[in-house]
Image: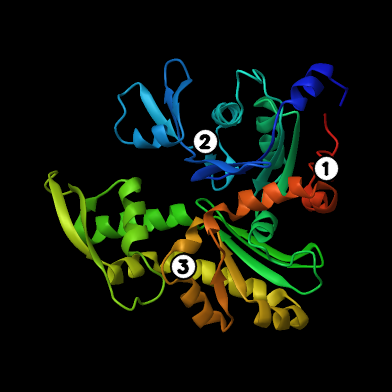
Amino acid sequence: MAFNPLNWLLGLFSLDIAIDLGTANTLVHVHGKGIVINEPSWVTIDKRLRQPIAIGLEAKEMLGRTPGNVVAVRPLRDGVISEFDVTQQMLDYFIGKVHDQSVVPLPRPRVIVGIPTGVTEVEKRAVYDAVMSAGARQAFLVEEPIAAALGAGLPVGEIRGSMVVDIGGGTTEVAVMSSSGVVVSRSLRVAGDEMDEDVVSYLRNKYNLLIGQGIAEQVKWTIGSAFPLTVEKTMEVRGRNLVTGLPETVQVSSVEMREALSSSVQVIVDTVRDALDEIPPEIVADLMDVGICLAGGGALLQGLADRLADELKLRVWVAEDPLTCVVRGAGLIFDEFENLSRYLVGLERGSTRHSG
């Protein structure tokens, strides 16, 4: 790319930013400052003008409460961009928010973004283009399980093997790593969103109760589980009765929610088992020492580590602050760019490395 003196000048005053552009949440890490933004990946748009009205937390709070001319959208689906223009506007907003725009009116940061392992070249290009359109001077891509492993402090650069299961909103990423590379990886589109849908379906089928996604997510975190709890829980869930059309409250137990979530949890368990089946016995022996690391928001589902440990006969542990592993790992790459830039992925192998 040709040298642009204005970009270079603005770049002197711009920050190095790592972004976990998630289906459910977008997190932004600024080099030297840590995580400065953690907001839902929601945008509310005026349908007539196609202009964003609110972005992030404010947009999510409007969910289900918008007038007819306003629509709330999540511009990413299953970990990939489904609404390019809206994603670009959301990135533009977040990049602007982390800079003091009285000092840097047109920030031109270097940006690293996490992407799922299973994405196509077209989907990779869409992320790269959206970041560049949002004002980045350079854009780099890193696969989310690699970033999650770095953020969780796994020995990615060592010969001994390690394994991470990163459960986000749209995708679950499974990766086994050894000697700075990925030995086996799996990306499946069963994750937090699918679990929320499971809760909605279960309550609709069993109680004729219609609830929204926000309430389903709340139920999942409060009483959802993947393994029997020491003390089972109950909670009241409010919604609309589909038969009478009137508001109704039902008492729901953690046992019922475990049943509701069982099919999605089983898909994740089976995918991890399939990945283990493919790796050499030497790495299996390493994993018996290191264990399997759970990252991403889905790692916070009660009893998930216990369920995996019980079925796979390996130690399974949840990373410290699993929700932020990907963005912290991506941020680490800027800390040690010379050493860790080898984990970045190019569009056509290396084409993102030296842009700008």
Q: Earlier in the sequence, mark 3 or mark 2?
A: 2
Kindly identify the residue that appears in the image at 84 percent across and 39 percent down: 351
Q: Quadrant of the N terminus?
A: top right
Give the x, y percent position of residue 13: 72, 25
**Residue assigned mark 1:** 348
**Residue assigned mark 3:** 265
The amino acid at mark 1 is Glu
The amino acid at mark 3 is Val
Q: CA distance from mark 1 to mark 2?
A: 25 Å
Give the x, y percent position of residue 87: 57, 32
Q: 37 or 112: nearer the eye?
A: 37
The color scheme shown is: rainbow
Q: Quadrant of the C terminus?
A: top right
Left or right: residue 330 versus residue 204 is right
**Residue assigned mark 2:** 75
Q: CA distance from mark 3 to mark 2?
A: 25 Å
Q: Is residue 78 visible?
A: yes
The kind of secondary structure element at disc 2 is: loop
Kindly identify the residue that appears in the image at 72 percent across and 83 percent down: 285
Q: Earlier in the sequence, mark 1 or mark 2?
A: 2
